[in-house]
Amino acid sequence: MVSALGDAELVTSIQNGQTDAEAALYEKYAAKVYYLALRESRLPHDAEDVRAETFLRVLQAIRGKSLRSPDALASFILGTTRNILHELFQRRKQAGKTKEPEAADLSTPSHEEQFLDSEVQHAIERTIVRLKPRERDLLRMHFYEELPTQEIARRAGIAPERVRLIKSRALKHFREFYWRLDRASAPKKIDTQRR
Amino acid sequence: MKYHLAMMHPQIEDEEIIERYVRKQLAEEERKAFEEHFFGCNDCFEKLQVAERFVAGLRDAARRGLLAREVEGTSRGSIWRGWLVPAFGVSVCAALVLAAFSGWLYFSQMPKLREQLSRSAEDLRAQQAARAELEHQMTSSIQAEANLPLVMLQAERDVQTAPNEVSIPAGAKRLVLWVDVPAGKSNSFRLQLDTADNRPVETLDNLQRNSYGALAVSLPAETLQPGDYRIKLTVEPPPSSLLAEYRLRIRRP
């Protein structure tokens, strides 16, 4: 199974002309490249372009045997992604658009929205129902109002460690609910992995 | 490979790296180190995806008002906070006050109350005994009595004269003294009963002659123990003068 190969073996197989090894490489890293590209560029079509360009350059480097260390393939792919994102931001700047994601216009879709679908909403609602009112307050202050943990603990009258515990418990419940829903609709994939 | 494992799992866990990465709160070096890590670590990338969905879902819920304190469908909490907690608190306080009062009453006042009750019971028993005695005496006084002992006193003339004797049978309650009074102008007399050694036993005033010209006196039999007694009859009012003196010997079978 090519998909079970390690990075060094994948590089060797690609260099030996095995096309299924190229597919396995894409399968292994495409979601990560797309996620990072979407997080930084905030636009799905730019993220798709970044992903396509990244794999094109990576495969060229592998085929041309310009990859110095096959064991560092993951780092090489990450570095390539960052370079292409940098080029994207340069183009945006030249075109008069904002460069940095943090400075993007509010109307620009956040990558966060790409993670929000009906299953996530449903799992979150089920999680919230299980929370105490004070715990809902705490999560709102932390994730929505972006208050520091110390301030949240002070307002809630609890220890900061307790804040972390409540977050962790809520995340655990969410994960369980979401996985059940995700299994029930197995063929559907989150848009962060679209090709 | 060593680059993306530079950030190790314990650090990621302890420093909440994944959540902080999602919330874009990592410093640039930390961010780059974590990206190096999750590019080579499928587990952390999977956790990162879940955390992204979790944070996105929570922020969406906050915007929709689902993270407000009063969320529709969770009114149980608001009712609990609204009035049940204060009511419960008041009830608990009342119970504590009642318990404290009961404790104070039990440990402080109960011994005193028990002592008072004990004294009252003793008083009641004493009163009941006195009442029973009185009733017994009243019953004795109103009941007819047969074979009443009686002695007709003869004044002593000298020392050799034999004393008046009377035998008081068992069960007799009274002893009747019959005293013939010498003729005279006086109509009121006093009779004093002493033991032989001059200890007073009984004194009766305002004695009047009866139709026989004698004095009739009833004495409680129980005060008369077997032995010799002296009876002095004097005239009233004072200055009294000794009218006669008698000797009486009580015998009991």
Image (cartoon, rainbow, N blue to C red):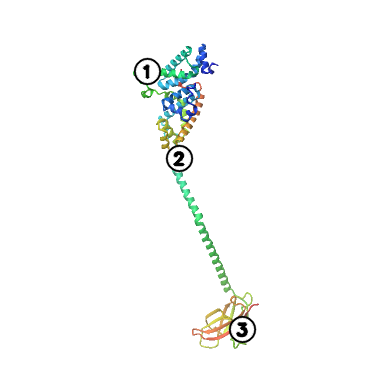
Disc 3: host chain = B
Q: Find residue B107 and report its horizontal and vertical position in percent.
A: 51, 55
* Discs 1 and 3 carry the same chain letter: no
Which residue is disc 3 drawn over? B164
Residue farthest to the left?
A96
Q: Is residue B4 above or below residue B149?
A: above
Q: Identify the secondary structure beneath mark 2.
A: helix
Q: Is residue B48 visible?
A: yes
Which amino acid is tagged 2?
Trp
Disc 2: host chain = B
Which residue is disc 2 drawn over? B80
Mark 1 vs mark 2: give the one in front.
1
Q: Is residue B222 above or below residue B241?
A: above
Residue A159 image label? none
Q: Residues within 10 Å of mark 1 (few under 14, many from 20)?
A: some
Q: Using the numbered discs, state the Cα–Cα distance from disc 1 to disc 2 in whole angstroms.
A: 58 Å
Q: Is residue B74 visible?
A: no
Q: Using the numbered discs, state the Cα–Cα distance from disc 1 to disc 3 in whole angstroms.
A: 156 Å
Q: Using the numbered discs, state the Cα–Cα distance from disc 2 to disc 3 in whole angstroms.
A: 102 Å
* Discs 1 and 2 carry the same chain letter: no
